[in-house]
Structure formats: C-alpha cells, structure tokens
Image: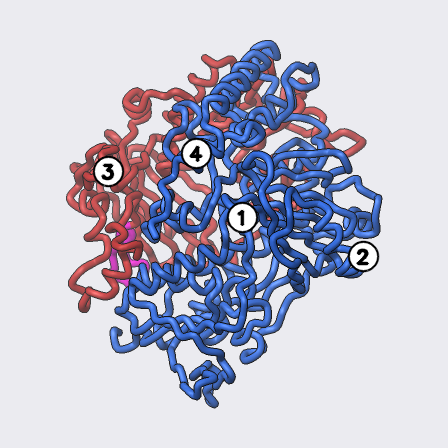
Amino acid sequence: MQGNRLRGVVIVGGGTAGWMAAAILARRLGTRFGSISVIESPEIGTIGVGEATIPPIRLFNTALGIDEDEFLSATRGTIKLGIEFKDWSRQGHTYFHPFGVHGTSLQQVTIHQDWLAARESGAVGSFEEYSLNTVAARLGRVLPSGGAGESLASVFAYAFHFDAGLYAEYLRGYAQARGVSRIERKVVRVELRSDDGFIRALHLDDGRQIEADLFIDASGFRGLLIEQALHTGYEDWTHWLPCDRAVAVPCESAGSLTPFTRSTARTAGWQWRIPLQHRIGNGYVYCSRHISDDEAAATLLANLDGKALAEPRLLRFTTGRRRKFWNKNCIALGLASGFLEPLESTSIHLIQSGVTQLAAIFPDRSFDPCDAEEYNRLQIDEFDRVRDFIILHYKATTRVDSELWRYCANMPIPDALTYRMNLFRSSGRVGVNDRDLFVESNWLSVLIGQGIWPRRHDPLADLLPLDSVRNQLQRLRKLIRETADAMPTHEEFIASLSQPQR
Amino acid sequence: MIVGGGVAGWLAAATLARLLKPTFCSVSLIESPLQTDGAFSAIALPSFHRLNSLLGIDESDLLRRTCGVFSLGAQFADWGRVGDRYFHTFGSIGTKLDAVPFHHYWLKLRSGNDSAIEDYSTASAAARVGRFAPPTSERTSFLSSYSYGYHFHAGLLAAYLREYAADHGVTRIEGNVADVHLRAQGGFVDSLQLNDGSHISADLYVDCAGPAGLLFQRVLNSGYENWSQWLPCDRAVSVLCAGARELAPCSRATAQRSGWSWQTPLQHYSDCGQVYSSRFTTDDAATTMLLADLPATALEEPRRLQWSPGAGQAKSDHSEMLP
C-alpha cells in the first residue's frame, strides 16, 4: 500500500487559507508524503484585513503547538468574547452574542427556561446578565487563559481578533521551518490529464511546470483550479443572503480596547468593527441593488472611530458555495470554496474545518471516490448549517426602514431554519444537532437578541418554587458580575503579553 | 397515565416519578394482573448507568434483586459465515496513535488472519476468558477502556422499578383497558374504559402496552412504518433454564437457518431463545430446535412472542431535526 501514497501536495494561494493548510499538513505529515509547496503570486494581494474568529481557532493553534501569547503579539491580536449586534432586530436596539454558555443549570432544564419562568414576575434582569462573557465584554475585561474562577470556568470561552495578513505571515514562517517550499510565481495554465480530467500540472509564468498528486485551491474567489479548470459549479444563495459587496478600511483606534467584534446593521447591509492592538478593521457589507459603491464607502468613512489609515477597498462576492469542495484531485479552501458574509466570524473556521477534515480523510493516489464523497458530505453539511444561522439574523427582524430589510423579513428561508424558529417560538427549546458548530447557547443569544420570544417556557421550570428560582438566579447573576469585575481590563491583559521578538 | 406494566411501563413510571413531584403532576399506571414481559431477560446497554444515577439506584442492590449480572458485550457466532465468531464490545478497541484511529494500524500491519481486531480490546479479551472487573477512571489503565451493561431477569426488574415507582408516589391501577374514548374535537385521547366499566382519564398517555400498540396504532391510527423487508424476523420462542456452570460476562447471539438464537446468563438462571422469521420456519420447528440445544434444564414452559419489525411513523418531515 505504501507505493500508493501521495508524492506531493501543491497549494495554490498564499493567503490565510493557503498557509493554514500548509501549516497543518506540515505539522501532520512532515515530508513523508513528498513535498508540500505553496505557490503565491507576488502581485495578488490577500483579502484578509482585521479578522475575527471563534473559539475553535484555539484548538487549531494548539494542534500546531503555537504559544498563544507569542501568536497574539505576532498578529497584533486581541481577545474576543463575542459579538455586539447593533440595530439588527430594530433600530436603537443592541444585543450581545457571547461565546461560552449562559449560567449554570439550576434544575433539570437549561437556565434560560428558569429565566423565562421567573421573568414573568420581574426582578431577574436581562438574559445577557447570565453570560459571564457578555458581562465581562461590556466591562471591557477579559480573562487570561487558565485563570477562570472555579465555579464559572466551564462557561467562559474566547477567541481572537488579529491581522489576517500577519497571521498568514506567521504561519508561513511556521510552515517553511517545517519543510514547506514557497514558490513566488503566477500560475498561467492548469494542465489536466486527458484520461480522467484530474489536474496533472501547473504551468508557471517562468515556464516551470509543477506536478503533484493533490492540489489545494486557496486562490480566492475566482477558484483558479476548482472552478476555472475543473468547472465544479456554484450554488448561489443570494436569495437568502442578498449582500454582494463589501468595502473595507482600517482606522486609528480611539477610546478603550473593546474585547468584542461589533456588527451594526445599516440601510443596505451591515458594518463590522474589529479592534486590533494597533488599529481597528472596518467594513461595510452591502447589497449593490440598494446602495451605490460610493455611497457605501461614504457611509463607512462617516462611521469610523478614528482617522482612516488607507483608501477604502472594494470586494465583490456571490454568497454561496461550490457544488463540491473536493473534486477529482483538487480540494478548495477559503474563498475558493465559497463565501458566507463574516457576520458570525466563520471564514477562518471554515478553512480550519476543511483542513482538519482533509487530514482526517487524507487520500492516497487511488483517489477512491468515497474519500471525496465523505469529505463533501461533512463539509457541505457544515457550510449549510452555518448559512442557516447567518440567515436567522436577517430573517428575525422588525426593521422595515429600507428595501433590504423589508425583503429579508418576508423572504422564504430554508426548511430546517423555519423548523428551528418555530420550535423556539413554541417552547423556548432549541433543536440542536450533535454536529452543529453553533450550539444551544449561540442560538439562544441570537434568537432572543433578534426579538423572537417563546410563547411558553419549559413546564419543568415550574418544579422549583418561583422564590427559590429567583433567589438562585440572583445569586448567579451576582457571582457572574463579581467574577467579571475581578478580571483585568483588556488593555492590561494585552500590555502583559511579552513583546514580539524581532 | 401509563398503559401497561412490564419493564417499559415501570421504567417510564419510575423515571417520571423521579423527575416530577406528586404535587406537580400525578403519575399512574394501569397494568393487567396477568401481564408479563414477553422475554425472561432484559439486556441493558451501558447507557443504563445514566438511569441508575438519575434514579439514585444502588447497583449492587439492583443486581441482587433482579438476578442481574454484568455484560461486556455480545458474542456473535456464525453471522458473517458459519464458523465465524466476533465480539461486539462495550469498550474501545486499541487507542489512537498520532490522531489516526487505531484500526488503521491494525489494517496496515495484520497479515492473513493471525490477529483479530478484538484482541486489542480489554473488554473482549476479558469476556473471552469469562472475567470481569469494574472499569476504573484511571486513564493510564487498560481498565479504563470499557464500559459495561447488564442482564436482568425481566420480571424481577419490572418488580424492582414498580417498587421504586410506588415509593415515589405512582398509583398502580389493576385492570384491563377495554376501550379508548377519543375527544370529539382534535381526536386526542379523552379517557380509558376498563373492563369493570370504570373510566379513567389523564392529560398525557404513555403507551407501554407492548406489540399490541393499544393506543397509538389501533386507536389513533398514527401509522406504523414496517421494516420487515430489512428485518424479516417476526417471532421468538424462549425458555428459562437453570444457570450455566460458568457465568459468561456477555450475551451470545448465534445465527441459525431461519433467524438466530440467544443465550443470556443471569444469576442462577440462563435465558435461551430463538428469534425467527415466520416466512422461513414454523413455530413448532423453532421450538423443537430451541429445546434440542439447551445448555441446562428448562425450568418453565417456553414463551412465544410475535411482532412486526418497525416503528411508529414520524409525523413531521423534520423529525431528523429533533435531538
């Protein structure tokens, strides 16, 4: 069987996706499966600006053996405890989608059911006060790794904001130190095998030919291999997620360093704000049918914390995904695999999920179709579930102030999402699946935050006397507040990191 | 209101009684004075431990009073082909090395038939030599690599749960349901009429009446999804025997010409039976076959069971969404 092992992997594209793939493959395979090369064109800029992530990124860094403090310093990263959503459910309304889980259960039901039961008689505060992440985020405080208070340690979680360009650079150093070669050239032609249509070789602009058994397409939106060469096809989701452009600009920091991403709904889309150590990343994701590029850029520039540090950059995209992520001997990662707006910071996670899955279903030269089928089944499922969670933000709104919001409030949505929303409306229950990336606490935050209210609470929340539930909720709320108060401020935490060694 | 005793009915009664307080909601169970479980034994998977901890059941007390024993899995014989044997273990097989699942190394290194994958499972190895030790939580020990289930005497398990339920406030009603009355509007169950003419009603009914499917299929016409094209067996005959000389910590399922036979050891007893397809053999032939090959003296008359394989139909197209 050893004669059948892969003799080389070529990754096209040196952005976050390309270098994440190179790093994890170098870590897992070393050079035992032939060479790993990354072809990156010196002329093509990478898209990543300020990038926000979700907690599983820490598993990825751990798998690579990366030291968290060193990583934060190298990428000018900050701590992220969740996302603040402004003006989504209605103008003037703000809610927080935290990482981690809410409270700890008092009885047989999850805490939100107790809260729902008790709030009818008042004096139990908002649901957000039962999330340690939310309370800490609002206070601008964070918990350094490992320092969680004992009783609440299990409810806290965090991720990062970082400069995606610096992260790619950091991973490039990591991968190159482990034998990955970097080819700074442009691919001018993709040569397919005549018998089965697999990719045989890539022709570079210096006349070289690069052969490999496995090709990873991390070339961005255009999908140089997966689409332009293999014509895999694309599933368009614009009818659910109509935004198709973004304009991005970094600006100077001002005020305190918030440990969260902010997403502000606007007339024709939404604006992100991602705080880094040295600046703030901003962008306006919008629907070109409802606003002009100039108007979008002007709106963005008028809503910055500090002075813009560059010219606004325009990005065009079509929300959706390739019909297959793995086609023949090519696997698409990152923007080459599909696009979901970064509303829940899932871009990097989907890359991570793809490369981790590739390492778990690593092929040999026979390229048994079962490998690709299983990979596609799992990754398509992951992509589609994330899509539904993002659609929820647009669907569950009472905004009627612009065409985009009127459209979204009335649009048909995927059946699985309708089912979940109806289930929650009925009983406050969230029908999560084992494979869901976003679990009960995530759905709760967004469902409640977007203004969807259950008609009733779980009847078992009435098992304990109301007074006792209320007292326990009050104690929990106090404990969460005290735990958050004792954390260092985000600035203090970042200042405590050792400076990068250059 | 739970209809039907037996293991299913009393398990439901005990669990609901534990979760709910009598002041919150009353729980009753109607059981026919004659009802017994079809099978002599009941096999529990490792998931039963969750029930133990939910109900606060003391394991040794439970086993003592139900003739219960430990099980490390099931021995399958003659399934792949006559003469084959394999063990389906309640434990893990080997351990991941460098994030690659163990069985890939076994596939790579095995030559011919010199090693069975179950040789790398502590639970399988222990079951083969008839030994058992409770698993530990010490992760470096091989004794942490498995869980275990139980075999119970079904009648004694039902009695045990009945006593538990009674202690937790469940009312037992002795009787047979003669008729089910539905509400004119909506078609929900309104009341049950017993054979003494009395009516009883509740808000929620749990149907544990056995294969007859008293409420759901017969009265509510909720539909039944038939699986007999995949699972052709639809009958069983079984007999309670004296205990075997050696107490195996596993159950045994041996493929036969028209189905399969089981042997499930208990304390003092062993439960033996034949599962068969009525399309391929007769009741008499199956009974003769069972009685011809008993490991010990039969203690009771054989019991017969019949069913149609399948499940109540899911009403919603989104049933896969439910946790």
Task: Tell me the distance, in whole angstroms, between the alpha carbons under discs 1 and 2.
Answer: 26 Å
- A399 sits to left or right of A421: right
Amino acid identity at mark 2: His
Discs 3/1, front: 1
Discs 4/3, front: 4
Whether A275 is drawn above or below B54: the answer is below
Amino acid identity at mark 4: Phe
Q: Mark 1 lies on which chain?
A: A
Q: Mark 4 points at which residue?
A: A493
Amino acid identity at mark 3: Arg
Please say if the residues under marks 3 and 1 sit with CB atoms less than 8 Å apart.
Answer: no
- A385 sits to left or right of A479: right
Instruction: Residue B81: say if magenta.
Output: yes
Amino acid identity at mark 1: Ala
Q: Mark 2 points at which residue?
A: A290
Q: Are marks 4 and 3 on the same chain?
A: no
Residue range of the region highlighted in magenta in the rendering: B75-87
Q: Where is residue A421 in the image (x, y as percent from the top left)?
A: 68, 41
Farthest-out residue, bottom: A194
The colour assigned to chain A within the rendered structure? blue
Task: Tell me the distance, in whole angstroms, between the alpha carbons under discs 1 and 4.
Answer: 18 Å
Task: Tell me the distance, in whole angstroms, between the alpha carbons under discs 4 and 3.
Answer: 35 Å
Q: Mark 3 points at which residue?
A: B139
Image color mode: by chain
Classify mark 1: helix, strand or loop: strand
Classify mark 4: helix, strand or loop: helix
Q: Earlier in the sequence, mark 1 or mark 2?
A: 1
